[in-house]
């Protein structure tokens, strides 16, 4: 009894997870459908998502959800059959229905309460829509269609079920006399699904006897479609009496035949009646390929062989495709805690592996060294594939924002479209999750404060429709996420005035543009005259800054008054592991993230004398300021005769860091220093070295800022 | 906090700092490690000795002697790191505390613990949970949560001062 309950509970859990995914897909498809209202593929996707929610909902006892979804599904069934057109009204209703389903699921966990009146009103409106829609036929989706192409009510097979047909279309010789162009018929077939068409030319006479007014060619078509055989025959309805038409099913989804390959070439030919089995058998004794043998023997010409081969190929592809889809569905759902545990373990393994390599190097024994190398290789592979498990495309987050933009701009009476770019960019799962809140705040800000009302835009000579562009892309070991809008831009004077009013800056302070824009991230800062339910409380950008900082990321603001604002988030690919450069100062070992390191150069006492003790170095004619880490970190020990400068590039500026010597590259598992050290400048974390001691990871940008504050002279040279 | 808060006999871990005996509630102590090497975090107060590797996690180490106004703890064969779990702003945090030597685990009845006198201790009384008595000897029972909370604040202040 208990076991059964557990099973059901697990099932309900699985349903909730599945439903959450389906609802996301539903939302994405609906928004796309709004842009392409006739896309049958999208309609199919919406329908299937609804259908699955309904089916599994009923299975796990979510009867209310099943019942409600059924109504929405009914509407989309009509759309699918071409009885109802996709309108803004329908997508609006469906989106509302989607939210209602989500509320219902949440309600089952006690997180929310369902307002049944909302359900009723949605269903009522939908029914009104479907009844109205039934009366009027959908106006031609595309012009110039033959009646047969329209998915007719009786002939359309189940949407998800695809069948492969073998069609031989052999028109009568006088086909051309009626003015029929067989190519058009073939094109029509092509539009029904994935197809291969092979022209058979064996009946064509020699050129001197050739009569261009007769049709001597016939065609073999292999077609995989969701339409029924009758629908295919309908294509040829007008030439019915003038052709020889064979339609046979050769492969059907759902048959338990996946294990076997498709028929051999000979079997196909025999099945088509192109060749007799006994003739074939006689010839099979020879060692050539069946096709060649047959052609050589003159039993079939190469055209037929080609056609049969095409069939073989086509079926293979269709089955592979199906297999792939099936494999995709067979992916495993793993709780993310287990994944986190795995990443932790890999992190530990990387540390131990580093120790092993170090021990092997000291030990010098050949056998041990080779084992250590093997372990190193495997560990790296393991690390990479573990990390890749956690990588997800950012696109799912993007599509969520499409909805946000749509709803918000409607609420505010603005016309805003959202465009996206680089949705396939992969990021660590945790990073994506933590990105959600900052992105919401930034986009809300863009919509509320950035993009102007349509009339204001027109007056300013801009298009009525505002654009929020969301893009993602890789840049070295970082991912850049940009949120651009073509709105009013930031008002520098207003921000500065507000900052002075709030006492954030002294009234006489001279601030750079960058510093002024930085003000918008201060807690409680808002220039909005009134607080709306969208924004204006001044919480948002503060959250953005905090979350991005926590992700070891950087926020950059660029804005031009009247032209728009661009906010760039620069984030590390993964939070767990970085490649670092190990450096030593006296007895202390530090790690500099390799991503910012440009090169290493030597610094002798003579060099220092030559620059009269100024902290600048001449690297191939370029002056680069440097920071003596020994001094900044207050390490009390004699410096060696020859030091090294690690040259880094941060925010387009080169800064050198003087260390005693560079040990080498080191793969580093990042450990946090905990709350005690969370405000330390210049240190982003720690790592455990091969010998078990702890080394600190330097946070170069914050180090530069901190030095700049302590040593104004350097600040000038670095230009911060 | 006063000694009346404890009502049942509690176990304490005793340790020495400059030949004085101190004690910590055993429920706060995770383990005791030998003191080997510590990595100093630059630009932090002197009493923050740095961080150590505790089986793969990085744990900060505090020099209690420096914190209590004594001299810096020098490394001897007996020097130990007491790993404690403290609650800070309702989150628990693992820290290491340096001790000259760790003595033993003792049991003290609540009535044997007296509140710390408010003067003459040369030590901030809010760090002290009470004074335990054993064989005519006093044991200073520390309130570890208080020490580290105060630490944090002091440290944050110092950090912001140095940054200004």
Image (spheres, rainbow, N blue to C red):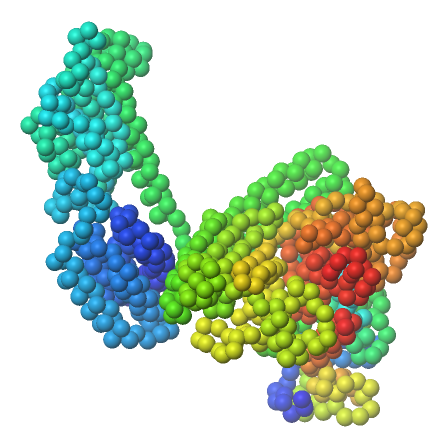
Measured from the top left, where is residue A40 in percent x and y? 26, 48
Percent position of residue A80, x then y: 21, 51
- Front in this rendered view, residue A11 or A182: A182
The answer to whether A99 appears left or right of A75 in the picture is: right
**Residue at x 56% of width, y 48% of height:** A474
Residue drawn where x is 65% and y is 63% of the image: A514
Position of residue A514 relative to residue A285, above or below, is below
- Numbered-mark total: 0
Any part of residue A580 in sight: no
A333 or A222: nearer the eye?
A222
Quarter containing the N terminus of chain B: bottom right
Q: Residue at x 14, y 17 (%)?
A: A214
- Quarter of the rendering occupied by the C terminus of chain B: bottom right
**Above or below, B22 relative to A210:** below
Q: Quadrant of residue A619?
A: top right
Relative image position of residue A118 (x, y in whole percent): 27, 73
The single residue placed furthest to the left in the displayed view is: A241
**Residue ID at (84%, 77%):** B70
Is residue A125 among the parts visible in the rendering? Answer: yes
Res. A14 image quadrant: bottom left
């Amino acid at each position: 009894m208990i076991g059964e309950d557990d099973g059901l509970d697990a099932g309900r859990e699985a349903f909730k997870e599945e439903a959450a995914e389906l609802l996301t897909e539903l939302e994405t498809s609906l928004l796309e459908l709004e842009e392409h209202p006739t896309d049958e593929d999208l309609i199919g996707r919406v329908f299937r998502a609804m259908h699955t929610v309904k089916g599994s909902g009923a299975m796990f006892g979510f009867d209310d959800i099943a019942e409600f979804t059924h109504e929405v599904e009914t509407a989309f069934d009509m759309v699918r059959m071409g009885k109802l057109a996709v309108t803004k009204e329908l997508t609006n209703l469906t989106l509302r229905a989607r939210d209602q389903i989500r509320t219902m699921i949440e309600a089952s966990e006690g997180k929310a309460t369902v307002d049944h009146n909302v359900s009723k009103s949605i269903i009522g409106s939908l029914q009104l829509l479907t009844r109205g829609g039934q009366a009027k036929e959908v106006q031609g989706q595309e012009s110039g269609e033959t009646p047969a192409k329209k998915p007719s009510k009786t002939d359309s097979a189940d949407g998800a079920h695809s069948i492969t047909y073998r069609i031989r279309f052999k028109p009568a010789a006088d086909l051309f006399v009626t003015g029929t162009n067989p190519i058009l018929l073939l094109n029509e077939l092509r539009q029904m699904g994935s197809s291969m068409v092979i022209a058979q030319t064996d009946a064509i006479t020699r050129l001197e006897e050739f009569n261009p007014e007769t049709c001597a060619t016939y065609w073999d078509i292999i077609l995989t479609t969701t339409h029924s055989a009758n629908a295919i025959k309908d294509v040829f309805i007008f030439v019915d009496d003038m052709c020889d038409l064979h339609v046979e099913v050769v492969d059907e989804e759902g048959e338990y035949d996946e294990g076997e390959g498709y028929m051999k070439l000979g079997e196909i030919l025999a099945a088509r009646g192109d060749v007799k089995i006994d003739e074939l058998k006689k010839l099979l004794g020879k060692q050539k390929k069946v096709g060649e043998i047959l052609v050589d023997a003159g039993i079939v010409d190469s055209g037929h062989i080609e056609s049969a081969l095409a069939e073989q190929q086509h079926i293979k592809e269709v089955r592979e495709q199906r297999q792939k889809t099936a494999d995709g569905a067979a992916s495993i759902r793993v709780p993310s805690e287990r994944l986190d545990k795995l990443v932790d373990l890999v992190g530990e393994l990387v540390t131990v592996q580093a120790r092993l390599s170090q021990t092997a190097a000291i030990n010098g024994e050949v056998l041990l060294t080779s084992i250590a190398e093997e372990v190193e290789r495997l560990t790296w592979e393991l690390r990479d594939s573990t990390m890749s498990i956690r990588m997800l495309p950012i696109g799912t987050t993007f599509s969520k924002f499409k909805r946000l933009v749509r709803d918000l701009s409607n609420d505010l009476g603005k016309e805003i479209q959202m465009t996206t770019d680089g949705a396939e960019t992969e990021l660590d799962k945790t990073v994506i999750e933590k990105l959600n809140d900052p992105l919401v705040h930034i986009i809300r800000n863009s919509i509320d404060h950035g993009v102007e009302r349509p009339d204001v835009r027109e007056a300013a000579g801009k298009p009525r429709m505002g654009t929020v562009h969301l893009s993602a892309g890789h840049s070295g070991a970082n991912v850049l996420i940009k949120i651009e809008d073509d709105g009013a831009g930031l008002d520098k004077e207003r921000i500065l005035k507000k900052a002075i009013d709030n006492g954030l800056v002294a009234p006489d302070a001279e601030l750079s543009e960058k510093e002024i824009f930085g003000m918008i991230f201060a807690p409680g800062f808002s220039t909005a005259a009134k607080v709306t339910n969208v924004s204006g409380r001044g919480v948002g950008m503060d959250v953005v800054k905090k979350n991005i900082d926590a992700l070891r990321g950087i926020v950059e603001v660029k804005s031009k008054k009247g032209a728009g604002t661009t906010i760039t988030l620069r984030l590390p690919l993964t939070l767990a592991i970085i490649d670092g450069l190990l450096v030593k100062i006296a007895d202390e070992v530090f790690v500099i993230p390799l991503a910012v390191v440009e090169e290493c150069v030597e610094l002798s006492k003579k060099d220092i004398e030559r620059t009269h003790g100024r902290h600048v170095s001449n690297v191939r004619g370029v002056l680069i300021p440097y920071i003596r880490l020994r001094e900044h970190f207050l390490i009390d020990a004699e410096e060696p005769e020859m030091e090294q400068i690690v040259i880094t590039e941060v925010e387009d500026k080169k800064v050198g860091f003087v260390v005693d010597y560079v040990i080498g590259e080191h793969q580093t598992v990042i450990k946090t220093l905990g709350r005690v050290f969370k405000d330390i400048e210049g240190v982003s974390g720690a790592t455990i070295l091969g010998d078990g001691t702890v080394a600190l990871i330097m946070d170069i940008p914050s180090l530069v800022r901190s030095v700049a504050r302590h040593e104004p002279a350097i600040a000038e040279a670095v230009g911060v | 906090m006063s000694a009346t808060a404890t009502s049942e006999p509690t176990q304490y871990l005793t340790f020495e700092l400059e030949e004085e005996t101190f004690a910590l509630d055993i429920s706060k102590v995770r383990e005791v490690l030998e003191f080997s090497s510590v990595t100093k975090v630059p630009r932090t107060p002197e009493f923050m000795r740095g961080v150590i590797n505790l089986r793969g996690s990085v744990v900060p180490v505090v020099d209690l002697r420096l914190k209590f106004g004594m001299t810096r703890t020098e490394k001897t064969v007996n020097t130990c790191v007491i790993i404690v779990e403290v609650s800070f702003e309702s989150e628990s945090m693992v820290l290491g505390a340096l001790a000259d030597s760790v003595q033993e685990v003792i049991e003290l009845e609540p009535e044997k613990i007296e509140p710390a006198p408010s003067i003459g201790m040369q030590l901030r009384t809010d760090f002290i949970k009470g004074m335990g008595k054993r064989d005519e000897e006093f044991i200073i029972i520390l309130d570890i949560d208080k020490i580290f909370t105060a630490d944090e604040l002091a440290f944050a202040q110092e950090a912001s001062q140095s940054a200004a």
